[in-house]
Amino acid sequence: MTAPTERPIRVLLAEDQSMVREALAALLGLEPDIAVVAQVARGDEVVAAARAHDVNVALLDIEMPGLTGIEAARELRDAVPGLRIVVLTTFGRPGYLRGAMEAGASAFLVKDAPAAQLADAVRKVMAGERVIDPTLAAAALAEGPNPLTDREREVLRAAAGGAANADLAAQLHLSPGTVRNYLSTAIQKTSARNRADAVRIAREKGWL
């Protein structure tokens, strides 16, 4: 009588670029102990997919429509306790790493990592380990914490499209003066010349 086969690790892939998502799914599908059971292209579809497919590990891209990978990680942490989260990004920005860890991620990898490394990370997080590139971890420590508050980040993200303060105020349900104050503080904290420069700097550092 044969021993029962262990259940494979059930993985959700969240990535808005279909070619990248399909390539990752194909590579992980070659692993005998890993099964990609769900794929989504938007961050705001992550929680529903994780619940519907009884997922063990979620692989989340940072930049997605609906919600970012870090925002989706926060929702998953609260909605599906015990699920392991791996954040993937094209850019190894220290601010992204810190944000991902604070959101409950167990691993942070850049997309150009070898496929074997990604599969190994899935196995390690299932075993309760953390997987972080040591160079990136050192850079995150050197960079220090994100100086922007949640509200300053929200206002700065909304300002990225170049809308006037009055429009931002209506969008965010704040007064124009409050919006101006948040933007002014964000410009000071990022040592930027203006709000467009503050958005650029905050994005480069992974603070948004």
Image (spheres, rainbow, N blue to C red):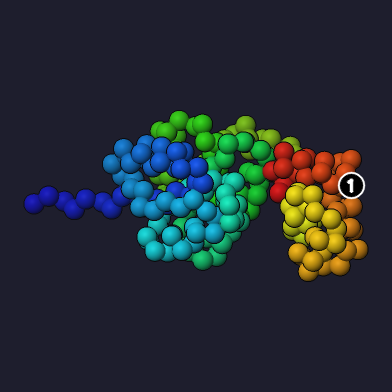
Q: Is residue 71 left or right of residue 60?
A: right
Determine which quarter of the picture holds residue 178: bottom right
Question: Which residue corresponds to the image point at 57% horizontal and 49% vertical from the top-left?
Answer: 64
Q: Is residue 166 left or right of residue 54?
A: right
For disc 1, the neighbor class at 10 Å (few under 14, some 14 to 19, many from 20) is: some
Q: Nearer the viewer, residue 129 or 145?
A: 145
Q: Is 164 drawn above or below residue 143 in the view shown?
A: below
Determine which quarter of the picture holds residue 154: bottom right
Farthest residue to the left: give it: 1
Secondary structure at numbered mark 1: helix
Q: Nearer the viewer, residue 115 or 161?
A: 161
Picture coordinates of residue 168 (x, y %)? 80, 60
Question: Which residue corresponds to the image point at 58% horizontal and 52% vertical from the top-left?
Answer: 65
Looking at the rendered structure, the kind of residue marked 1 is: Gln
Question: Which residue corresponds to the image point at 33% horizontal and 48% vertical from the top-left?
Answer: 35
Picture coordinates of residue 143 (x, y %)? 74, 39
Q: Is 125 drawn above or below residue 175 in the view shown?
A: above
The number of numbered discs placed on residues in the rendered structure image is 1
Determine which quarter of the picture holds residue 132: top right
Q: Is 9 drawn above or below residue 181 in the view shown?
A: above
For residue 189, say whether it is visible: no
Q: Is residue 23 left or right of residue 179?
A: left
Picture coordinates of residue 85 (x, y %)? 50, 51
Picture coordinates of residue 107 (x, y %)? 53, 45
For residue 12, say whether it is visible: yes
Q: Which residue is mark 1?
A: 188
